[in-house]
Amino acid sequence: MTTTIEAPALERHAAPYRLGRADGLATGHGEAGPASKRVVVAFGFWIFLLSDIVMFSAFFAAHAVLQTATDGGPTGRDLFNPTRVAIETACLLASSFTCGLSALATDARNHVWTQAALLVTGLLGLAFLSLEAQEFAAMIASGAGPERSAFLSSFFALVGLHGAHVSVGLLWLGTMMAQLFVKGFEPVIYRLICFNLYWHVLDIIWVAIFTVVYLIGEGR
Amino acid sequence: MNLFGNLSWDALPWNSPLPLIAGAVVIALCVAVAAWVVLAGHLPYLWREWITSVDHKRIGVMYIALGLVMMLRGFADAILMRSQQAVAFRAEGYLPPEHFDQIFSSHGTIMIFFGAMPLTLGLMNFVIPLQLGMRDVAFPTWNSTGFWLTATGALLVNISLVVGVFSRAGWLPYPPLSELQFSPDVGVDYYLWALLISGVGTLVTGINFVTTILKMRAPGMGYLRMPMFCWTALASSLLIVAAFPILTATLLMLTLDRYLGFHFFTTAGGGNMMMFINLIWAWGHPEVYILVLPAFGVFSEVISTFSGKPLFGYRSMVAATLGICIISFLVWLHHFFTMGAGGTVNAAFGIATSVIAVVTGVKVFNWLFTMYGGRIRFETPMLWSLGFIVTFVIGGMTGVLLAVPPADFLLHNSLFLVAHFHNTIIGGVVFGVFAGIAYWFPKAFGFRLQEGWGVAAFWLTLAAFYAVFVPLYMLGLLGMPRRMQHYDMEMWRPWVLAAMIGVVLFGAAMICQVIQLVVSIRRRDLLRDETGDPWNGRSLEWATSSPPPQFNFAVTPNVAGEEPYWEIERRVIASRQNESGYEAIPMPRNTATGFVTGFFATITGFAMVWHIWWLAILGLVAAYAVFVWYAWRDVSEEEIPAEEVARIDQIHRKRRADRLARHSDAGESA
Amino acid sequence: MQPSHFARRRFTPSSRSVATLLPNASMLLLAGCSGGVLDPKGQIGAEESKILVNAFGTMLIIVAPTILGALVCAWWFRASNRKARYLPDWVFSGRLELVNWGYPLLIIIFLSGLIWVGSHRLDPFRPIASANEPLEVQVVSLDWKWLFIYPEQSVATVNALVLPVEVPVHFSLTSATVMNSFFVPQLGGMIATMPGMVTQLHLKADHIGDLWGLSTQFSGDGFAGMGFSVRVKSKEDFASWVDEARKSACDLDRAGYAALQPESRNVRAFAFRSVAPSLFSEIVRGELSLQKASESAGPVVPCPEAMR
Ligand code: HEA
Ligand code: HEA
Ligand code: CUA
Ligand SMILES: [Cu+2]
């Protein structure tokens, strides 16, 4: 390691970059080199989820601003059906739980249980979606669609955005289950991790929606 | 319901010759280029080596090419605007408002989203993995997809030139003007879909870079050894991740308003237009730092290299960069002091804004002290950097002036504001990109750019800049607002005419740039860079050959050790003198995923603009199919065998050694 | 003034080089602005432009040496200068860091004081202290013209703002169309006009004479033609102008307003002799939106000669 071709500066003891510390060891962090693929994928996906949460925050902010802008139309109290929302919430929370179970099964490399847990997750997600669709359809039919007022616009957009995320998740889930069935764990293992993250984040966002939109909206 | 939605022959600009001719010329050019590519048999090469490439260097070069072409388009718009104003004194000029309004809107949109953004992302793509000692970025396929989605947006904006119209609501479409009620045509829709699609691309790229920089660095590359450019790129990527979702959300709301009758920002139904203005600037202000931070990084590299010194006050620089990053989210209200928020709010945001001057000032002073005690070589990248310091400081100062609310009450939305942001964007971002291109060009292509024409381009650009924008500052002080299609104030006229001269100078500067490129390509054998280190730089990218092999580094450099990053390159080269441990390198395989996704995104976007629902659905389904197809492939990597790696590396080493030997011979005899 | 000569004299120095630019630019800044925001004709404008110039001067204290320093430094340490010292290891200095952060910080602290005080004192909502009773003016931006209502006088004008000298004016502003911005450069105090909202502005004109105003927030195809004249008159002349306006043939009732609403460009100024009392608040509440207004309008006659 001593063959220097043109680096006289190396020999100087007063290294220009002592980076403030007296011992002169410019070590810093990240010594070990590139992280494993698993870490990189999960990390990247986390960053994506964070950005998604930022997008949701913009819709939450819009809803907060427009919550009272009913333009003489119906308010949340007139429209929301607490029972249905409670069932929706239960479905989603349960699906988050089964999703967690699928991760356990994946860790054990157990095909049957993984598929079963994913299937239940998907079905619960589907139930959630159909309840939400019913709610939307009923509101629109009663003349309380998104065109009615800014409040309803923000409601449909925020809740609908979450619903769209759930739909995309289901599509993804189905594709992955097929892949798992055909090809086994190897190619989908990272995707399963990411899906878990995704599904839990959707759950958290739903809890926020439940609180901000339905509970507070109900109180108005 | 029509099969083609709202699209009909009337969408073509039959009765306005200017866009028709321009469009025809552009289409003819594209067809000609495409025909040439196909007939000369370049298509397979292009497809294999570029279009489907996931190599960050190739993608970087494509980003930069896209950015330059779009800047040219934006420049054409600028010429139109300035010449219209030059003749529109107490007259209609040659551009009726319907056209003029499209032109400033598309100029701003194109320059920011499809000129400046691709240029900075391109530099980041090319440089970061090389500087941090990596084989590629964290998600190469997403990287390619991000690029093609950006290209999709650019394409959509340019399609609007011929089919239909572009937005007439400015580069940030304030409602209610941009709502269906006041802008019923497809212009705003083109804007929305172009930005929604390219916004996703940018976001993906941002995520990619955050992950890459935080998780993929070579062994030993601690945070405080990263070159400054990587720090600024990291800051910029973090801003992208935090800010672009806001843009997407805001534009989605406007889209819902326009397509489904929602009432986010409408005047009726309880909508709140001020919410749009708040949201868009919550993205918009960070956006300007997304653009300028990487440029700051370029200057840090260039000034230190050409002064023959490490960067002064590295830690301060890092702190300042992160400071800008954070503060940039706390100042958005300075874009609408005149909306009547009240004294305390205005004052708070004004003060927060001017604090950015402190952190930016730290950077400027550190560049100064980097030059102090250096041995400065005035090659083109350094010239751009000096031009930058002088110009940007002026632009920053006028920015701080605008941050003083009472002053902003006089200058908001005037040409003074226009001059301010061109002062920071051209003096900061554009100069930075030009410096970066000149600096890393030899790394990318293996030969330097010719000096003479570059120097000429620099001086002409500098002169042109002042010739255009000093008059605009004056006009702002004389009360002239932006976006005036015609005017009848006598006292503005001389300055308007003066600015026109500046545009001519800009044209001359552009011509110099193009000539420089042509001349350099023709004389590439003379300008060849054989050592891989043409400027005596000291960061890692200079330790590999020019152009670097596909895998960047034959052996992942280990930079753990005592010497600072300024010496990293030396250390890595030295440690590799008697290397034998070559190993096979797995590299990501090329894939058409990005290109195909972009293709279908274009179709979907176009279909949405014209309400051709079946086509939009088809595009979405196809996009899903691509996703599944991609998910289904078995082998995502291919190996480059160890012998091949060894062979390529030996060639580079030999060339470098020969060159150095020749050099020292010459040195002794002299 | 002959514009072309004027132009040639003024712009040549700026296109030459950076070094000669600065002094010229700042000289021009002060000299070349009669008729602009640096040539105020009213109290608010005067205070604002004073703040502008003060802030500019404050920043020059740090910016000018910085630019100069950069150029001198680059020149002195050019590689070919044998006399310059080469300090390749000089990369950190605690004392200089202190200056780096401290110097701009000082300037900004000073500037922050300016911002804080200025923002509060020149808050557009803040009434102007004066011995004179303030005049009420209601402002409505339309496509693409300005409507000025004098509720106390019960007259109104389009594209002409007439003000008594030295009387503080309280503007209430809204928009019947998209967002616009009301601005009289020589009186200062730009403020947005927005549909469904009312902004407030206080101005005072201190000199008799003719000024001009315009919209600064782009509002569509006719935006460039939204200039209006501003005539500052003595109190007596103002009173006689009001009498004059009362002789106009036009009434600003619902029908008159409905006739104003359709898009029109480069509208010549004219006056209304009467104004429906609650018109402004109805406009703000959106009760006179385009369709509704034209429904109630009946035959649209009011002021055809004025609307080209
Ligand atoms: C990145 C951003 C960017 C850039 C670079 C520019 C560059 C220029 N702009 Fe632009 N401009 C905006 C962003 C930008 N602008 C925005 C956001 C607006 C507001 C829009 C709105 O109102 O909504 C605006 C508005 C705007 C106006 C305001 C109109 C008005 O409101 O009245 C004017 C008027 O003169 C103008 C002029 C110019 C000119 C003369 C240039 C010149 O500097 C152009 C010169 C060209 C270049 C510096 C790049 C060229 C480089 C190449 C061509 C590459 C060379 C080729 C090879 C090497 C192969 N611009
Ligand atoms: C790359 C782009 C870029 C950059 C870097 C900046 C940098 C800054 N900008 Fe600018 N700005 C824009 C692009 C940019 N801006 C655009 C596009 C718009 C308008 C868009 C539109 O409306 O269409 C805009 C508009 C804009 C406004 C709104 C004005 C209005 O609408 O009325 C304001 C107001 O505060 C502002 C302020 C600033 C400040 C304080 C900085 C600071 O970051 C500058 C800091 C730098 C310095 C100050 C120089 C160096 C410092 C020193 C040498 C230290 C000493 C100096 C002092 C103590 C003063 N900008
Ligand atoms: Cu109300 Cu802006
Ligand atoms: Cu800003």
Image (tube, rainbow, N blue to C red):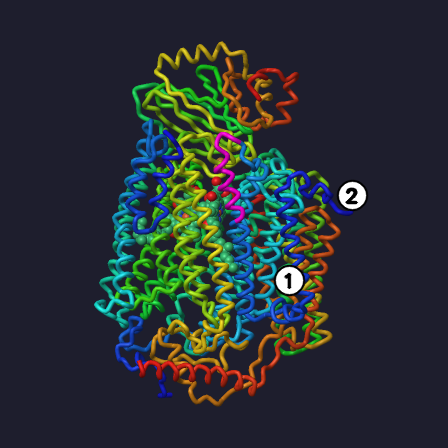
Amino acid type at circle 1 is Ala
Judging from the image, mark 2 belongs to the subunit labelled: B
Amino acid type at circle 2 is Met
Give the total of numbered labels: 2
Of the two numbered discs 2 and 1 in the rendering, the one whose residue sits closer to the viewer: 2
Q: Residues within 10 Å of mark 1 (few under 14, many from 20)?
A: some
Secondary structure state at the residue bearing disc 1: helix
In this picture, which residue range is highlighted in magenta? B76-91
Quadrant in the picture for the C terminus of chain C: top right
Write the residue at 43% across / 38% down. Answer: B496
Q: Do marks 2 and 1 both belong to one polypeptide chain?
A: no
Q: Is residue C177 left or right of residue B455?
A: right
Q: Which mark is residue B1?
A: 2
Q: Is residue C196 left or right of residue B327?
A: right
Report if residue B129 is visible in the image: yes
Q: Residues within 10 Å of mark 2 (few under 14, many from 20)?
A: few
Label 2 – label 1 distance at C-alpha: 43 Å
Q: Which mark is residue B35?
A: none
Write the residue at 40% across / 77% down. Answer: B569
Quadrant in the picture for the N terminus of chain C: top left
Queried whether the magenta region covers residue B206, the answer comes back as no
Q: Is residue A26 above or below residue C75?
A: below
User: Which residue is denoted by mark 1 in the rendering?
Assistant: A94
- The one nearer the camera, B100 or C216, is B100
- The one nearer the camera, C74 or B623, is C74
